[in-house]
Each structure stands twice: as C-alpha cells, then as structure tokens.
Amino acid sequence: VAAMLASFAAATAFAASPPVCEPGVNMPGGDLHRMPLASASAAACSALCSADPACVLFSWHAPACSYYRETCALAGGCCWLKSVEAAGRSPQVNNCSCSSYLRLPSVSKRNGDTTPGPGAKNVLYLLVDDLRPEIAAYRQPRGHSPHISALASSGTTFDNAYCQISVCSPSRMSFLTGRRPDHSRVLNFIDHFRQADCGLTEGGVAYLGPTLRNVTVGGCEWGGAAPCGGSGDCCSICSEDERCGAWTYTHTNSSCMLKARSGARAADSGAVSGARGTLSTRAAWVSLPQHFKRAGWIALSSGKIFHTEEGGSGNTNPNLNGPGMPPNQDPPSWTPGLSMQRVNDVANMWDCKIGLPPSDPDACAVDADMSGAIASPLTTKQFCDRVIADDAVLKLRLAAMHTPFFLAVGFRKPHLPFRFPAPFLALVEGDVAAHPTLSPTVPPIAHHDAVPQPHIYTPVANATAHEWRRHYRAAIAWVDSQIGRVLHELEARGLAPTTLVALHSDHGWSLGEHGEWQKFSNFEHGTRVPLIMRAPWVRESVGTRSSVLAELIDIFPTMAELAGAPLDPQTAASLDGTSLAPVLRAPADAALARALKHRA
C-alpha cells in the first residue's frame, strides 16, 4: 500500500506551473465525449485538458488502484476531461484519483456593472455551522482548534459578537443581506428574500374564501413534516396575480389555493395562509456575494452558505428551484458554474449514533484517519466537510488565476450529528455544564430543546453530558483541520497578503446550559458567535482583540469597505449593519468602539 501511495504521489505531481492536482478527489459527471483517455500522469492529463478549449476541469485515476468502486482499466492511468462540475453530485473522496480546475466554465465571466478598482482585495469567507466560541482563540482550554487560533493571531478577534436570531435560515438570510430579521421579514424556514413580502402568515390555518385557481407548488424535497418553502412560493404567485387577495398552501398535496379574499378560517395543521404581498419591497436587494459579483469579483461557493434544506420548487426558472432558502444556494449570488448547488446531495450530513465503536458504519466517531480517509468506503459514508474542503481548494486554485475573487466556504460541523474521524476524540475531553437545568425563576418559554435531557428541570446523566460535549468538541477539532487545509492553500498560492479572511458561525449552541441542548433560544450560548477578521494590509489589526459589540449584520458593510467594493448610496442606506473597519484600523480606541455601536 505504501509503495502504491508513493507511486501515486509521484504521478500526481506537477513539474511546472499548472495548478496542483488535488489528491483524493474524483469529480463526477460533466465528461466530454469518449472518456476516459489514456494518460500516464496527472500532469499529462492536465496537458490534454489545456489543449481542449471545452475542458474546464479534469480527474485523473491511477492504474491498478481501486477505492470506493472506482477503477481504471487503461494501462498507465485514466484521464477524464470535463466541461463542468456536475451540480448535485458529490465529488467522491477517492485515494486513487486527483482533480483540478484549469479554466472558468464557458458560461462564467466577469459580468459586473463595474470593474474592480486599483487595490481591490480578494475575500475568503469561512462560515461554520452551529459553532459557539468553544475554541482556543476565545480562551477555552478544552477546545482544540489550532488553525482557527493561527487565523486569530494574525487578525482581529471580536470578543462580543452576536447573531441576530439563533435560527439557521433566518440568521443566514440576515447577515447575507445585511438586514435584521424584522427588516428582512424572514423569521422561519418558509420565506426568503427573493420571494414576495407577504408580512405575517398564519400557520395551521386554511382560508375558506372563494378559490380563483389551484396551483401545484413543490415543498420540501427533503421530506420534512412542516409546510416549508412552498408557502413562500404560493405567496409570490398570489402577489403576481392582480385578482388574488389571499392564499392557502397545503403541505400534504403541495397545493397553492389562490383566493379572492380570505373568508372564514378553518384549523388545518398542514396549511399556511396569508394575504397578498408585494414584490417591490426587496426587489432591489442584493446579497453579500452578489454585491461583489456586481462589482466585478469572481464569486464562488463551496458548501452551506444559505440554508440548505427547506425550499420551494415553484419558480419558472429551473435554476432557481431545489432545496434551500433561497433555493439551490441562490444562483443570482454567484458567478455561473462556480457555486455548489444541491449541497445536501453533494455533502450530506449523514446520521450517526454516539457510543458505537468506530468500526460500525453508523458510528459518529468513524474509523478513518485524521485526513478523513475512511477505512471502509464501501460501507461507510464520506465526511461532508472533507468534500467541501476539497471543493474549496480546487476553486481557490481556479480563483487564484482570476483575482479579485470572493470565495465563500460553508462548513457543516459541529452541527448535529457530531460525525468525525475517530482519532479526533483523543484531542478533547468532556465535562458537565455549570448550570445543567433551567432555573425555576426563568419562564419555560425561554427554553426550546432538552434532548438528550429527560426534562429541563432534571439534569442529564453525567456520562451522557460528557459524551455529547466531548463529541461536539471533537467535531470542532475535525472541522478546524479542514479550515486549515483551505487557509494553507491560500498561503501556498501566495494570496494571503491580499485576501480578506472572515470567519464566523451562523449562531451559537447550548451544550446543557439551562437544560438546553440546541440553538433556538436567546440565551448567551445560543446567540454569541466567534468572529475573526484578517486584513493583513491593515497592520494595526494584526493579532488584536476587540470588545466592541459586533453583530453579524455588520459583516456586509465591513467586507465591502475593507476589500474595496464600495456600496452605492441606496444599498448603504438600506443596510442595518455598521462597518467594523474603523475597529480594525484603531483596535485600541475604546471611545471609537463605544461610539460605533452607540445605538445598540
């Protein structure tokens, strides 16, 4: 095996300047005609791709090597030339293969309204799902996150950073548009900012007024029990019909009933109803990545940026359908062909059970090495964050040839289920929350989820608390290793001095404090997030900390200012956040910090 890996390493090496073929990645689909071609090395495969204008990326497979059902029958090696990364199909982690981008997809171009000005900076935007500041950079001794710590030591760490709402989709919709949830009017897993603004809706209620017509609208492709995104599409369809005054969406049959008026009401647990809305409120809004795309940046994504699960399918444009809020990671936000779509298909968060031995395919602590290479790939699913990091490294290499770029990478752990390579358990310890039950003085409405706790006023068994908290920390250690891969690639490409790096989570997470084991609360653990920003050209900011009250809605204006993509007056006036750039330029100015957030 060692000899085979050494031979593979030699065959995948490049002698000159082309981007390195990333080992362990086998890109799916998008093949040109008559593939594969015989090729003795990754460099030879790269040369074939370079010579074919239709080739965007390639995958090379070593001969006489088999992993995860992938083999090469050609002597010397197999070369697949591809025109596009197939949407919705996972790049398999494959010890016999390597892949690389060589050029932009033919549909991609700099299609901004303006050209980036002199001194425009790149942006690497790192999002981490459900990460509370349980990391060494926030002086938490039980956390193992050396790569995030290294980022913090070269940037600015915000000690008092908070999300706007501790719910996945609304939080992401908030910071990716720069508006508070009461401004975006997205407070649930039903609506998104590309739809009509229909105000408050009524869940569990059906309107009985006269029906104008009935439209079938897709709901949750993931099979959830809630009405999900189909109701937002129903609201939009009603708002486009001048006769429609109200609507009812029924999840059980994906039925959108357009009503002349609401009429009487009836209880229906599978229905959501509302009044006609308006399409003008948010028509001029652009998302954070879309702002950079319009300003002339290449905008790329890997992993979970917008929410990935719920989402409707009622749009007449098929590219705007599919799971997610907005659907399919919002194609208008990205340079065509350079966003990861159908993220749940590509990088699924496979279920697992805490306490099973690593050899069990359903174990959370998986039999794999620290790189994420699984011991039994035919029976054990791959790691979502390994797939996302692989994709991000490939896109970063492509982006390096097309600066300035905006690359967003959304990692999925430490979100439940806590699944990671088993060796990471040895790096962390478990313990018990300081306040493991809800105080009787706190109203129950403040609490959301007690699982695995039997009751909010009864502490969970110490052994269970230890295991859950330890697994959460191991998931952080695992995702930190994948963040490190992306940051290492940034350094290796020589891009770090000219790239703004921002890292934060979408909200916090409770690990038994107050009997809470989730987000969905206004407790400190649910709302406080890590936030680190590195702008190397702002020398005063290197290795500093700030106690300023920072909010995730501040990310949009801060990135725009620091990277040299100024906001137009209309957009600037409509954002709710405040640029934190002055804090980076004068981190020790306490008066400035207080004045910056005097409205908070």
Image (cartoon, rainbow, N blue to C red):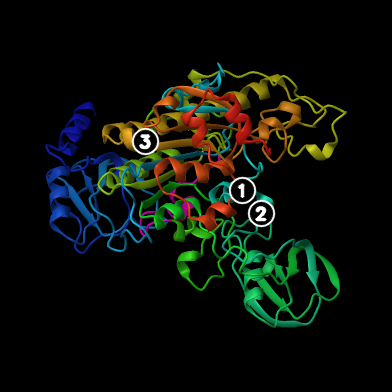
Callouts 2 and 1 close, C-beta under 8 Å: yes
Answer with the quarter of the image where residue 491 lies.
top left
Q: Is residue 323 visible?
A: no
Residue type, numbered disc 2? His
CB-based contact (under 8 Å), mark 2 and mark 3: no
- Tell me the chief SS of the magenta region: loop
- Residue 164 shown left or right of residue 328 in the figure: right
Query: x%, y% of residue 176?
Result: 54, 49
Does the segment drawn in magenta span residue 219? no
Q: Residue flagged by tag 3: what amino acid is it?
A: Val
* The magenta segment: 334-351
**Residue 445 sits above or below residue 90 on the image:** above
Q: What's under tag 1, amino acid-wise?
A: Asp
**In the shown orientation, is residue 142 left or right of residue 290?**
right
Going 57% across and 47% down the picture, which residue do you hit?
172
Q: Against 287, is 254 above or below?
A: below
Question: In the picture, which quadrant includes the N terminus?
Answer: top left
Residue drawn where x is 57% and y is 49% of the image: 178
Q: Quadrant of the C terminus?
A: top right
Task: Say whether residue 116 is visible.
Answer: yes
Badge 1: how crowded within 10 Å, few (<14), some, or many (20+)? some
Q: Which residue is mark 2?
A: 183
Give the residue pinned by disc 1. 576
For mark 3, what is the residue?
Answer: 486
Q: Which residue does the image show at 68% across and 61% down from the upper left?
A: 227
Give the Cα distance between marks 2 and 1: 8 Å
Residue 196, percent from left and from top: 63, 67
Dot 3 or dot 1, earlier in sequence: 3
In the image, residue 126 sits, relative to residue 198, either above or below, namely above
Label 3: element kind: helix
Location of residue 9 in the rendering, given as x and y in whole percent from the top left corner: 20, 33
Which element carries disc 1, helix, strand or loop? loop
